[in-house]
Amino acid sequence: MSTKKNAAYNVAYRMFSVLLPLVTAPFLSRTVGQEGVGLYSYAWSVSYIFCLIGMLGLNDYGVRTIAKARDDRAELDRTFSAIWQMQLAVAGATLLVWIGYAAFVADAEKEIAFALTLMSVSCLCSFDWCLMGLDIFRPIALRNTFVKLIAAACVFIFVRGKEDLWIYGLSWSLSTLLGNLSCVTSLKGKVSYRRVPMRESLKHLKPCAVLFISVLAVNIYRTMDKVMVSQIAGMEQNGLYENAEKIIYCLSGFISAIGTVMMPKISHMQKQGRTEEIRDHIDRSMNLILCMVSAMAFGVAAVAEHFAPLFYGEDFTYSGTLMIPLAFTLILIGFANVIRTQWVLPQSRDHIFVKSVCCGAAVNLVANACLIPSMQSMGAVAGTLLAEFTVPLVQYLILRKELPYRRFIGYAGIYAVIGGIMLLTVKGVGSVIPWKGWTGLGVQTLTGIAVYGALTLAYWKKTGKDFRRILK
């Protein structure tokens, strides 16, 4: 299947996966309030950390390793079997620890924690890494979409108050498990399990664990934020932060989806020694991604204060204020993602990824500890901005002699100017139009799209940009 179709399927699915909980978010916010949203966010954040441990970096390592082995069926079968045996051992041990946490450590969130146990169970049968490494994205998208629609329906039907939060957790965790199980049939005929010695499986443990350090570090400043806000500032503040971050997380899923499609393709090109093609690919990808993330960042900043109370309810008005600075992490995330998925990981230079995200995590923890007590949820926003800036900065310090960073920064500057013009235009339109509510927001959004689109197309025409080769 072409990269264009894979990208379409993966982007659509990733966006759907994040948008669907976002669709239920206004209903949940009005049903359970700030404290209920904060409580669920805290329980889910802890559960997600356990799932990350259970998968042990396979979402990067597995995709890359399968992509490099896919031309030789015997090697592919042996590689798949060894990695899955390791996955079963690690995910199984993690599941036991999670059950112990839910039973003996969890407090107010105990009922929700037990409902989320199926998240850890799903790690035993998650084969997305193999399917993506084989460039098979369609079944992941279609089958997971179906089960998540059922989960959303259950939320609207059965959740009626704060005491029903466990149903909310069970619906999403069960959909994850069923989605993983439904994708198993897609492996038939593509790869086969062959029992291999456990020592061969353990050979994958060290490189996988190295990437896991990076994955865990990333989620320290994306997930631990919520834990720290809950513990320091309270569940209400975490509820405000959760709903602000949810919008940004939705948009960052678009970036991750494109990176996920590109990594197996570039890894395959890397094995074939097509270095110059990879450099050209990175340049075009960086230009296109920075164009997209700048539109998102400045667009969200322009309408956030209007959007949040309309979408979540008046109790979450401050979430809009939090969204404004948080939106600009999208530019930093997009920049770092292109370098990571198209240069660092395909070359198996995992230590660069590890250093960059560990530095980001350290900055985030220190910033959170210093700022959350005085600034509450806004302190977590500041910590996230500093962390996301640190990651591409460390990448730059290591790779500045290998990649044309001056050109990349130039792209960022151009799209920032276009985004700034769009932001000012949208704000100006918002202050003069007579319509309020969703109508006014719609007018502002369409204005922003028109302005950003027109200026971007004019820039592309002047510079002769052509992005079609990226998705071939």
Image (tube, helix red, strand yellow):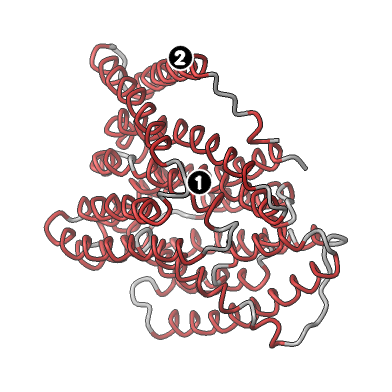
The kind of residue on which mark 1 rests is: Val
The kind of residue on which mark 2 rests is: Ala
In the rendered image of this protein, does residue 103 appear above or below residue 382? below
N-terminal label among 1 and 2: 1
Residue nearer the viewer, 186 or 331? 331
Provide residue 468's location: percent of width, then percent of height.
65, 28
Question: In the image, what residue occupies the spot 70% across and 57% down?
Answer: 271
In the rendered image, is residue 115 in sight? no
Q: Bin the neighbour count of mark 2 within 10 Å (Cα to Cα): few under 14, some 14-19, many 20 and up.
A: few
Question: For mark 1, what is the residue?
Answer: 338
Give the quarter of the image for residue 10.
Answer: top right
Tell me the quadrant of the picture where the C terminus can be found.
Answer: top right
Q: Nearer the viewer, mark 1 or mark 2?
A: 1
Quick check: 403 left or right of 58? Answer: left
Label 1 – label 2 distance at C-alpha: 25 Å
Question: In the image, what residue occupies the spot 34% across and 29% down?
Answer: 416
Q: Bin the neighbour count of mark 1 within 10 Å (Cα to Cα): few under 14, some 14-19, many 20 and up.
A: many
Question: For mark 2, what is the residue?
Answer: 454
Residue nearer the viewer, 153 or 44? 44
In the rendered image of this protein, does residue 309 appear above or below residue 360? above
Provide residue 375's location: percent of width, then percent of height.
15, 54
Question: In the image, what residue occupies the spot 53% across and 45% down?
Answer: 20
Tell me the quadrant of the picture where the N terminus can be found.
Answer: top right
Residue at far right of view: 189
